[in-house]
Image (spheres, rainbow, N blue to C red):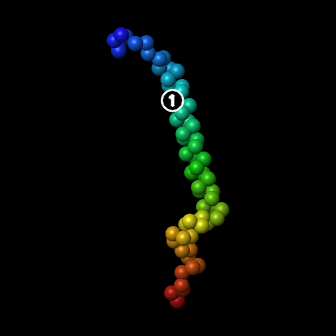
Amino acid sequence: MRRDVLPQRSPRANDAKHRRFEAGVFAEFMVQAVDTLLGQAIHHGSMENDRERPKNRARPSTT
């Protein structure tokens, strides 16, 4: 059977499935982003961040 004669899925059904997938990925990304931002706002940086860069109060004073 030639390729161009094969029955094709309706583009509308394919669209709906693709949209659902995109929405799921986008929602997951947004949840992670909000979770990260809220975590940083509540804890003023997580313990990993503390190890990466010291907080201002940990710096020796220059006066």
Q: Percent x, y for residue 62?
A: 51, 87
Using residue 11 as the reference point, say whether residue 5 is left or right of it. left
Identify which residue is drawn at 51% across, 29% down: 18
Using residue 8 as the reference point, say whether residue 13 is left or right of it. right
Identify which residue is drawn at 58% across, 49% down: 32
In this view of the protein, which residue sits in the foreground, 63 or 48?
48
Query: Is residue 6 depicted above or below 63 in this figure?
Result: above
Residue that label 1 marks: 18
In this view of the protein, which residue sits in the foreground, 26 or 6?
6
Work out which residue is located at the far right of the displayed protein and give it.
Answer: 42
Q: Percent x, y for residue 63?
A: 52, 89
Residue 51 lies in quadrant: bottom right
Instruction: Report crowding for label 1: few under 14, some 14 to 19, many 20 or more residues within 10 A (C-alpha).
Output: few
In this view of the protein, which residue sits in the foreground, 17 or 2?
2
Identify which residue is drawn at 54% across, 81% down: 59
Residue type, numbered disc 1: His
Query: Is residue 21 depicted above or below 4 in this figure?
Result: below
